[in-house]
Image (cartoon, helix red, strand yellow):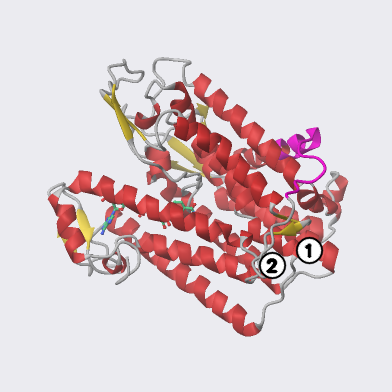
Amino acid sequence: MVTTRRQAAAGSGNGDAPRGSRTKKDSSKSDVAGRHPDHVEYEFFGPILGPIGIVVGLPAVMFGLYGFCGKHGCVSLKPFEIPEVNIGDRAISFEGFLVYLGWIFGVALLHLVLPSSRKLGVSLANGKRLEYRMNGLLVYATTLLLVYALVADWDWPQKIGLRASMLGYVYDHYVELISASVVCTLLFSIALYLASFRSKSVLCAKGGDTGSRIYDFFIGRELNPRIGSFDLKEFCELYPGLIGWVVIDLAMAYKQHEIHGSVSNSMAMVCLFHAIYVADALYYEKSILTTMDIVHDGFGFMLAFGDLAWVPFTYTVQARYLVDHPIHLSRAFLAVVLALKIVGYLAFRGANGQKDMFRRDPNSPKVKHIKYIKTKRGTRLMVSGWWGIARHINYTADWIMGLSWCLPCGFDHVVPYFYAIYFGVLLIHRDLRDGEACENKYGSDWDKYCNVVKYRLIPFVY
Ligand code: NDP
């Protein structure tokens, strides 16, 4: 997919596509930034077919989610019914592009003008550490305040030409916005790929500098593309897509109110859960600097599409569904869903926080009691606490939260469960990938660890 990978521990995620089988080839090509890769490992099913399939397939899924579930009907389980695919009257429009680009540049402006703190990233292959501007939570709060000002009918938004009814635009012109996001991210990724050839000193990502044009465009060739000190990858990972996700949710709540005269408790719950998830990601913004996306992956189609198209337009599927199906949940069901979200969140934050702390300061009183295995590599692997329950209990917790976002949509239709299904596949695959990476890093110590912590994701099951 595309997760905006991320972001999650830090925040989660953002644009991580499930990576496919690996293929390898020898290469003696010369290097751009001082590296001389002598062998190349392709992910996502090879250098050409996999990337092309994903570049075509993911936008198709986005349109499909709308086509099979919109105001015209939704794939139903009881009775089993598939509606006639319908993506509305207008699939693409100039106005859609204006709104979409206006959003991206608007958020960029807030990011640049609002107060920020500066954090240093990890050491790069060229020995440098980049400085990052961080104000995600402030940009998020400012945006939410603006949305509130619109619906509360304050004067000043009106004076600058903003109206609450603009929120309704998102639902009414959803497909046009999807089209704009797909076309813009495609062009953006091409621009990023071409710009990566501007100088021999550009630092390339190991996995995105294979010499295969389609693959490098897809994975991302340049590691940290910047305009001056403005870091494009970090910005896209955390700002327009994640905040856009919550704004689209709120626009759906507005539309539900406009159509049905009230906001259902299911819609309120979905919006709240997503808003908390994004707030958490932005609160822990600096943790993104040690994630795979920032440290290893280049910035290309995979991340750009994930961040700027996939996250805002597929993670909002439940809220969009609820506009047309305003479900009112019983108190008992609400309580169950809320309990699931809380359990998921506590485990997610607990596990990710524990590892973060353990890696930064293993002697901190918060993690001093944790049992661990000392490895030949020098680092320690925790075998008690959250990480003693299962090798990726943080993934399981994240998935539980994802399920709690889908349940408020009831059980009549399958499309609102898209997130739980897709994310489950993504996390199972990600666990296999990380297991493989750890086996390479730790060798026999990893086997020792796996003998102590036997289960991958679910204790006693898997
Ligand atoms: P993890 O936080 O799971 O980190 C994996 C790394 O942790 C390993 O490579 C290893 O690195 C270290 N590690 C593994 N086991 C142990 C141990 N027992 N003790 C100490 N260190 C250990 O990586 P991710 O970035 O994949 O996930 C972070 C979060 O992001 C998760 O909660 C996930 O659910 C979420 N996420 C969300 C997405 C979304 O779209 N919403 C997408 C992707 C992830 P080393 O030993 O080198 O330190």
Is 435 placed left or right of 286 in the picture?
left
Question: Is residue 280 in sight in this rendering?
Answer: no
Are the residues at dot 2 and dot 1 in contact (C-beta closer than 8 Å)? Answer: yes
Q: State the quadrant of the C terminus.
A: bottom left
Q: Which region is colored magenta?
A: 85-101
Element type where label 2 sits in the image: helix
Please determine whether, in this image, residue 437 is positioned above or below residue 184: below
- Residue 305: image quadrant is top right
Q: Position of residue 449 (x, y in %)?
A: 19, 59
User: Magenta segment: does it hold 96?
Assistant: yes
Q: Answer with mark 2 or mark 1, whichever residue precedes in sequence.
A: 1
Q: Residue at x 34, y 37 (%)?
A: 22
Residue 142, given in percent of the width and then of the height, sits at 67, 52
Residue, disc 1: 256
Instruction: Give yes or no for residue 331 being in the magenta stretch.
Output: no
Where residue 295 appears, x then y in whole percent?
A: 38, 39
The residue under the point 35% across, 53% down is: 431
Q: Name the amino acid type tagged 2.
A: Met
Q: In the image, 294: left or right of 177?
A: left
Reply above or below: 84 against 55: below
- Considering only vertical position in the picture, is 198 above or below 7? above
Residue with the mark numbered 2 = 267
Report the amino acid beneath label 1. Answer: Gln
